[in-house]
Image (cartoon, rainbow, N blue to C red):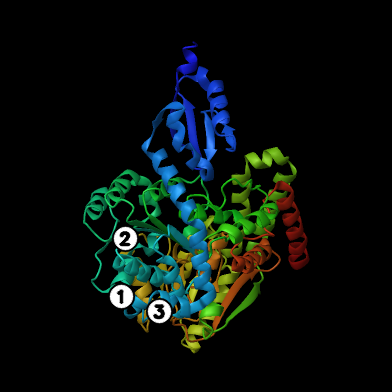
Amino acid sequence: MDKKANTKICIDVRTSEMLDGILITPRNRQDRIELLRTLQRNYPGVDIKNSASGFVVSSSQSDKLMLLDNICDTHWFDDSCLFVSNRQLAQNAYTGIQKEIADIVNGKVAIAKERLAKHKDRLLSLDDHQWINVAAMTLEDSFGMCIFDEQGAGKTVTFIHAYDILFEKDLVDFAIIIAPKSMVSEWKEDFRKFMGDLYRVEVVIGDKQEKIKALSSGADVLVTNFETIVSMENEIRSLILRYGKRAVLVVDESFFIKSLDAKRTRALRRIREYCGRAFVLCGTPAPNSPHDLIQQFNIVDYGLTFDGLDIPDDRETAHPIIQNAIENSGIYIRHMKSQVMPDLPSKRFNRILVSLNPVQQRLYKSALDGLILDLQATDDQGFNKQITSFLAKRNTLLQICSNPARLIEGYAETPSKLEVLDELLGEIIGKKNEKVVLWSFYTHSLGTIYERYKQYNPVRYDGSISSVDERRKAIKNFQSDSTTMMFVGNPAAAGAGITLHRSHIAIYESMSNQAAHYLQSLDRIHRRGQTENVEYIVLLSEGTIEVSEYDRLMGKEQMAHDLLGDKEEHHLTREIMLTELEEAKRIFGDKYD
């Protein structure tokens, strides 16, 4: 008898590096071929993919491996056992959960209230669409879902009440909420506003010792930021383990986890495995591309919606694949403000084309000509290697349109946009006594604006203001102090999660090229509590690339309404940038020559 034939191959089983399946590795590399034959013989219907470290079995088929011990000498790592168990439970519950959510959504608020009848006294303050959300979020066998209600529709309130019902049903004991830095403290305030002192809520902020103290506080709800989930992943995982599967993970403004290459995304994917439920909350889940949605769904459903799909990098090609997967398998709810808040005032956009002043013109033309020459002198390979440098030079063009003083020593001319702002603010604040939210992307421009208009008692909220207390004070003063007439902010820092509806006018002096920042910032004044029609005034330097840049953002704003990203958005190439800049040069010449 062949002794080797009766000897089981020794293998290790762990999760794959990309967290998309199970990795099976022979301890003796010489057993690799024999292991593959053994797997193929015992699992004929399973797709087994070759990798440098071993063999990978996808998430949806990982439950088939529970019998590996019968054919191999198997060492299961703790994370791999949990990985397989989670997906097995999710797959078993998937179809039923989808049907129940569909019944709730199709039945509208009547069905939601029927399902929540025992808890109706706890939900009296909710709008109809929030009842629907809470009913869907509190299904007993659920593992979570995506809440993609448009900004300002009350996603925070929805989760707070859903958590209350889950706690009342004895389904959960603890929640950890991951949010942008600017919103961490707001969660604690919102819990107090809607739940009083019913739950102990602590924020995990400060230095490491302060964070450890918060983690050890015994709070019912902890709120922290994306940076902390990376730096203190082990401590957070240890805490969650105490609650078994009765812990809830919440990811607020979940567009921050769009890339699996990001440390925050991987940390959240690992943490999620230890939580019985996960909810992702976002009003702009796909600001740039349909691909943005993938990791958000993966956090909720352990990767099952997109499991086994070959999704191309090209956005237009990927669009129908991702759309189809979400429609057929995605567990999510989306409410638009126009549907659930029909009385919310209207929005109006007003572009003002501004002519560059003489020195700005010369600086812009010189920078534009130089960048075109650089692009003409390289090829596609060189462009891809130096893309960061080319993007920085392109950004220089936009910064010149705003204020060249940061770039050019001794620049003494008043930038043209400041001259226009003098008139606008004099009319809006000086004569009409209306408050204004003024957005700018550049730190130097923000500082100049803040100092130039001190007569309007402005507050400032951008990366230069790191104190949470100072940021909250800025918002409070703008909202409640009748003498504070201007809010000066950067959409990258202040564009999400805050309310500025004491003003119904927002002016964009310059803006980020990140659609998420822009889309989020729009809703700071157009949200629940706004009583006036909202006006957005966008200052664009005529004949420059600012105009096409804004057109692109507006296109993304429209595409964001279907939650699938910008189908028309393209990858930046040397040819595209060169074509745009040459067209910009032609327009600029027509305008200023």
Q: Nearer the N terminus, badge 2 or badge 3?
A: 3
Disc 2 designates what residue? 172
SS of the residue under disc 3:
loop
Crowd class of label 2 (few under 14; some 14 to 19; many from 20; radius 10 Å): many
Which residue is at the front of the view, 558 or 466? 558
Q: Give the percent coordinates (x, y) of residue 31.
A: 51, 19
Q: Give the percent coordinates (x, y) of residue 533.
A: 54, 85
Q: CA separation, marks 2 and 3?
A: 21 Å
Q: Give the percent coordinates (x, y) of residue 121.
A: 32, 80
Residue type, mark 2 in image: Val
Disc 1 designates what residue? 193
Q: CA separation, marks 1 and 3?
A: 13 Å
Disc 3 designates what residue? 126
Q: Is any atom of residue 334 visible in this view? A: no
Crowd class of label 3 (few under 14; some 14 to 19; many from 20; radius 10 Å): some
- Above or below, 86 relative to 172: above
Q: Nearer the N terminus, badge 2 or badge 1?
A: 2
Q: CA separation, marks 2 and 1?
A: 21 Å
- Image quadrant in which you'd find residue 248: bottom left
Q: Give the percent coordinates (x, y) of residue 355.
A: 67, 70
Residue type, mark 3 in image: Leu
Q: Nearer the viewer, mark 1 or mark 3?
A: 3
Mark 2 vs 3: CB contact within 8 A: no
Q: Nearer the viewer, mark 2 or mark 1?
A: 2
Q: Nearer the viewer, mark 2 or mark 3?
A: 2
Q: Nearer the N terminus, badge 1 or badge 3?
A: 3
Q: What is the tally of numbered marks visible in this picture?
A: 3
- Image quadrant in which you'd find residue 36: top right
